[in-house]
Image (cartoon, rainbow, N blue to C red):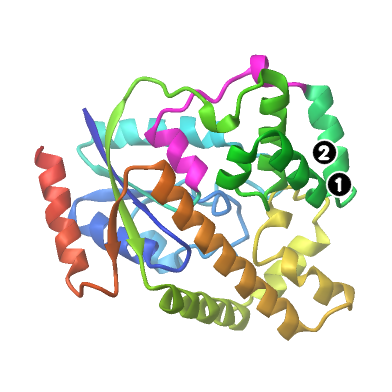
Amino acid sequence: MIKVVAIVGPTAVGKSALGLKLAQKFNGEIISGDSMQIYKKLDIGTAKDTPEELQAVPHHLVDICDASERYTVKDFQQKARQIITDLSKEQKLPLVVGGTGFYLSSLVNNLNLGGKSDSDPSLRKQLMTIEQAGGIDQLQKMLQTIDPKAFEKIDIDNSRRLIRAIEVMKTTGKSITEQNNGEKWADFYLVGLTDERQKLYGRINQRVDMMAQNGLIDEAKYVYDHRDEFPQASKGIGYKELYPYFDGTADLETCLSEIKKNSRHFAKRQFTYFRNQMDVDWYNISDDNNYQEIIEKNIVNFMEG
């Protein structure tokens, strides 16, 4: 069976750095499991690897879409599975690296993402009208009422996922979290990185400051100027929080603080999702200075098993 290693965990914990080292050691290639790194020209706010890092190891599913394009979980699942299959034939180790929980779950669990039977275009249009009118709070309350399980497990700040979860529940009467798994098609070893909360939060804050120094404001202004054309990307953490600054209704420091706060909340939700939804082998990067060596040994055992 195809062997795949996935590196998961909260934002800013060091997934990308570990992925690069493991890819170089095990003749691997990296498949991004991030829902924002697919977009061209959005580099800083999405925390893409540097151009040098992208050249050091082959990367897949990075810079594959214009920000105006719609990209779904099903798109990711299909593309990632094909890449993994091809890499396996070339005797290379596929390394899926990213923190978008539902993306990883769709791949690892081979989720049946449905079709016409759980779609209602007219309902979706109504929900999108609510969202476009600034009613994400209303969508959140709606989902919490009809599907509290999904409310706890999906990214409720992502209006597209809110709308999809409501649509599935209202159309089928079943939670989007209860989608059937398909047959097992690959053997996954899930490496989870975590850290003490205050240390992780400190790294998140530092990362945001570095992003601001490296051009985040200009990148966010580009998204702001095209926000009607970029329906998914315009709602990303790191961009939307700067809109009040561009509107002249908030100062820059306040907006950067909001990015830090939302990133910390997102990191907490990421950890909760991976811990509760997937079979992850967790490594606390502060508890063991040799965690990378241990991970490498466990990957060898996984590959030989």
Tag 1, which secondary structure? Answer: helix
Where is residue 260 drawn, in percent x and y? 61, 74
Asked if disc 1 and disc 2 are in contact, CB closer than 8 Å, the reply is yes
What span is in magenta? Answer: 101-120
Instruction: Relative to 291, say whether 143 is above or below.
Output: above
Does residue 107 show up magenta in the picture? yes
Marks 1 and 2, Cα distance to the nearest angstrom? 6 Å
Q: Residue at x 50, y 51 (%)?
A: 34
Residue 32 visible in the snapshot: no
Q: Residue at x 30, y 63 (%)?
A: 18
Residue pointed to by mark 1: 132
Q: Is residue 236 left or right of residue 99?
A: right
Q: Is residue 48 left or right of residue 87?
A: right
Amino acid type of the residue tagged 2 in the rendering:
Met
Residue 261 visible in the snapshot: yes
Quarter of the rendering containing residue 10:
bottom left
Report how many numbered discs are placed on residues in the image.
2
Where is residue 277 drawn, in percent x and y? 43, 42
As drawn, the label of residue 128 is 2
Quarter of the rendering containing residue 212:
bottom right
- Which quarter of the rendering shows the N terminus? top left
Does residue 51 show up magenta in the picture? no
Tag 2, which secondary structure? Answer: helix
